[in-house]
Image (cartoon, helix red, strand yellow):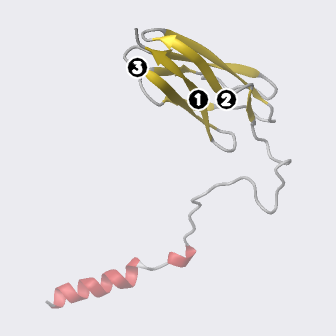
Amino acid sequence: MFRYSFFLIFFFCFSCQNVSNNSIDIINNPISSETSDKDLLMPIIEFDYDSYDFGEIQQGKFIDIEYNLMNTGNAPLLIRSAKGSCGCTVPDWPKDPINAGNSAKIKVRFNSEGKKGYQNKKITLITNALPSTRVLTLKGNIIVQ
């Protein structure tokens, strides 16, 4: 019993030592009260359009869409990932950095096989811009014959 008590006292005495000296950066936000957003080197992603309505199509058809984007910021834009909301919506995005002032295309292929009625698909992009998540949409109606 004495050993067990000694161990607990030892554990509690030394486990909390130097807690006040530890600092953890949970959020690394480059904008602070000491810097202006104009002083930062950040990409800015802008789209010609972020939603596309393909109207009505017959079931089984493919739709290919290109979303045009431009980096209007002052640092290279990286698209870390692009994911469709289901397996029928497959994005293809530039893997190389998009330099400031340059444009690029995100190509999306939608397969309507097995779908019917109104569809609203999302393509979620993860980038190094702020905000880091952008969502593109693709919608339309699938007609079954």
Q: Visible in this render: residue 96?
A: yes
Please report the residue visible at 68 percent of the width from the left and 54 percent of the height from the top: 29
Q: Position of residue 78 (x, y in %)?
A: 65, 31
Q: Earlier in the sequence, mark 3 or mark 1?
A: 3
Q: Is residue 8 left or right of residue 93?
A: left
Q: Quadrant of the C terminus?
A: top left
Question: Relative to 143, is 139 above or below?
Answer: below
Q: Amino acid at mark 1?
A: Thr
Asked if the residue under mark 2 is in contact with the one under mark 1, i.e. CB atoms within 8 Å, the reply is: yes
Residue to which mark 3 is pinned = 115
Q: Secondary structure at mark 3?
A: loop
Report, in whole angstroms, how far the alpha carbon at label 3 lies from the one at label 2: 22 Å
Q: Secondary structure at mark 2?
A: loop
Question: Relative to 83, is 60 above or below?
Answer: above
Residue to which mark 1 is pinned = 137
Which sits in the foreground, 18 or 40? 40
- The residue carrying pointer 3 sits among few (fewer than 14), some (14 to 19) or many (20 or more) residues within 10 Å by Cα, namely some
Q: Amino acid at mark 2?
A: Asp
Q: How many marks?
A: 3
Residue to which mark 2 is pinned = 50
Q: Amino acid at mark 3?
A: Lys
Please report the residue visible at 54 percent of the width from the left and 15 percent of the height from the top: 56
Which sits in the foreground, 65 or 57? 57
Q: Position of residue 75 (x, y in %)?
A: 77, 35
